[in-house]
Amino acid sequence: MTKHLLRSTVAAVALASSATYALAEDVTIRVWAGGSSPNDVYRVDAIDIAADLLEREAAVRGEELNITVEKKVDNTWDDFKQAVTLAAEAGNVPHILVTGHEDIGPWSQSGLIVPIEDYVNLDAWPINDIYENLLEVASYGGVVYGLPQDAEARPFFFWKEYMRKIGYTDADLDGLADKVQSGEYTLANVLEDAKKMVDQGVVPAGYGFYPRPNNGPDYWQFYTSFGGVMEEDGKLVLDKAAMQRFYQFFVDAVAAGVTRKNHIGTPNDQWWAEVASGKAGIWHGGTWHYARYTNQEGLKDFFGSISFSLIPAGEGGKANTLTHPLVYVLTKQDNEDEVAIAAELVKIASEPRINTLHAIKSAHLGITKQQSNIDLYSNDRWAREATERLLPHANAMPNNAEFGTYWNAMWAGLEASWTGQKTPEQAVQDLEAELKNSLGEGIVIR
Amino acid sequence: MSASRDIVEAAAVPAGAAAASAHPPRWRAGWLNSSRGLGLILLMPALVLVVLFFLMPVVLTGVFAFTNMSTATGISGGTYQVTPGALRELADRHGMDELAEKLGQPSFVVDEQGLKALEEMGIEPAIIADLREGHLGETHASRREFERMLRDLPERPDTRTVKRISGEFSRSLANSRFSSRESLLAAAEGVDPELTEEEKTALVQATYTGWVWTADNFRRMASSRDTVRILLNTIFFVATTLIIFNTAFAMLLAITTHYIPERPAGIFRIIWFLPRISPAVIYVLLWKWFAWDTGFLSAFLDNFGIRPRNWMLDTAANAWFFVIVINGFVGASMGMVIFSSAIKAIPESLFHAASVDGAYRWQQVRHIILPQLKWPILFVTCYQTLSLLTSIEQTLLATDGGPGGATEIWSLAIYHTALNNYAGNLQYGYGAAMALVLVVIGIVLSLIYLRVFNYRALVAKPRIEL
């Protein structure tokens, strides 16, 4: 077919045959993970474990393979992506990257990453056990580029004590998640309840609804809640009415005094500490925040203090959540042998047992079906309940090379209306002009 | 200066002449002996640095500005990839639905052509025989499906062999990548031998993943509503910081420290120099601790019943206040040092004479200090305008352009465009175009300053004896 495929396969074959006869092979595989906190060390440590297994497999076959894994974990996303793209231009990008699936679009187009399906058998264990929809998220244009590293969902959280103070019974709270899912409890109710909390002095002003304090995929959930669609038939979509309702929601929250006007830019550490200690009434976050709340922030009784649900529906949409799977991707390297070994490592790292270490330590959700048969996973109440309640309703952001431009513009519009620099109407008009200007035919506006 | 050069040249000429008459000429020594040659050599390191770190970036910015470079296109050139998006473009923009359909339908056909290729590659004959007998003429819609069939063959070929075989039976271009235009067209002609020139051009255009030359960046900048807002922000930021802090406040510091005894004056100057010599991150972090809702200011005001808040990002006005003060304190120290030394250079006797004449401090400032400080003020104004235009780190660390883009200045917008994107697609081309505008503004402003302050008069002989 293509020269590239031919070359890669020939190299792979050469590796397979040469490895049999080689006395000893020393390989250094470098892996970088972005957006990872100390709870996420298994993103890179899994590659270490996989290297050990691969070395043993080689030893059993009578070969000697020595793999050194160089690991680097970056706490943020922006810096990580900047570092990766610049390293790629400089020609020394690491073999394996752990990154958000949305990077597959631009990075595959630029040739920074290579399809993993060129190196592994997708029908073999453990890849054949990975959830189909997650594999799809790791694909671009029908080609599987990466393997999912974890899955998650982004729930709404309610501080039970304050909900009780504004009149909810324990039975109400137990049924809240179902009411959210059925669309009975909406974002309008969120504002109402948050306002009650502030008015009754249960929480300080600005702490009724206490959303994520910086840019993130979370905000696309609200666009979806108000009926917005991100992509259709491979083309980005801006639904102006939905976008305006979404902006308006945050403007209303500020006007009602339940959300702070200057909330954006609050440090994450402060946000986590505040919501985990019951300073806020209602907020949203990610399933992995469970690990943060219960470990670093010292929340003793999570299930006794907090209820969680999908993101409630807004006008014109339905309740939803967003999964933002991270993926292992392989970068293009001059040495094809190393890419083939990196592919093997990623494959082994996806073993349910190894992945479960990450899933439970970091409170993410599993990627394979068999993980529910592993005690460590199934005995974890959070993993079990979050998987059941949230994952079936999860959307993912599109893999589209232009999505980053759309995202930046969407965020700029939200920030401008939230802080009162523009009205939501004005912000959407500007967003439309900006997108027409920068994406042209790449986006459908309606 | 010119006198000393004359002496060097006068000395060099006879020496060189003498050497030439006595021995064959030694060109090396001759070079070094001429002051021009020596000067050039001594200047070389500086020249290299200027070219490398000043000229090259500017030239590259100019080049990048006329491209659509981004992470997706890469910098080092592109390939030709038949993605679903490229096929859609072929259909939508060029109206070549049929061609797109033909090229893009993924299909794997077991035919004699492919089997022959397998024989040439030296694939196990048993596998080829199986394929010929059991599967000749079969068509599979996806690679995965086709490879599954291959794996189910009695020989159970391993993954590497399967990948090699499937490559030979692919009869579509969907998702394939070509390193050159020729290989793309050759492959396309393999699918559809009757490609017209027009179709070829469209295909090449739609599938190219690299960057192309374009002036689109400037069109986009001109028609973007953000451009005007960011430009006004920048003008406001530069003008306010420059006038209030970099010149006026710096002058105030220089004059007040002039009139107090030497020792305390030195201490004051060092204190005001701290913002400049402390690392930007620590300096801004201190401001953040001061202004955040869990910071000093909130904690202090809490005693008076004022609700804690993030003072730095509370409103656009607050954010501007902090951005200007943070930048201004850094900038003031430079003006202070230059003005102080200029004041020191004014002969003491002038001040004594003025005192004897009964001039007040203010009159001394008005009639002695300020007139002598015209050139330092010009220098500080010029230099600080340009450095404020390109200043980024303090603002980035403090507000990052917030709240809601209120303090987004031009240099920060360049950074956000070219080097910062949550979804991993950095827009180098557009960012470079924005940077180029900054370069042009800088040059134009420098020229205007030179004109307004009358550069000729500046380099003329000083009017006071120094």
Image (tube, coloured by chain):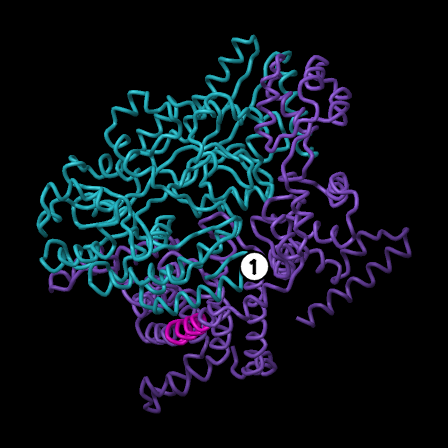
Chain colours: A cyan, B purple
Indicate the amino acid at tag 1: Glu
Was residue B165 drawn as part of the magenta stretch in this picture? Answer: no
Percent coordinates x, y for residue A48 in the rendering: 44, 24
Q: Which residue shows up at 59% across the image and 19% down it?
A: B151
Q: Secondary structure at mark 1?
A: helix
Magenta residues?
A: B232-247
Q: Is residue B266 visible?
A: no
The residue lying furthest to the bottom in this view is: B357
- Main SS of the magenta part reads helix
Q: Which residue shows up at 70% across the image and 17% down it?
A: B133
Q: Is residue B417 visible?
A: yes
Q: Which residue is mark 1?
A: A441
Q: Quadrant of residue B212?
A: bottom right
Relative to residue A360, is residue B433 drawn left or right? right
The number of numbered discs placed on residues in the rendered structure image is: 1
Q: Which residue shows up at 39% across the image and 30% down it?
A: A367
Q: Tell me: residue A359, above or below residue A87.
A: above
Percent coordinates x, y for residue B430 in the rendering: 56, 60
Relative to residue B199, is residue B266 drawn left or right? left
Query: The numbered mark 1 sits on a residue in which chain?
Result: A
Q: Badge 1: few (under 14), some or many (20 or more) residues near its Cα, within 10 Å?
A: some
Query: Between residues A425 and A63, which one lies in front from this camera angle?
Result: A425
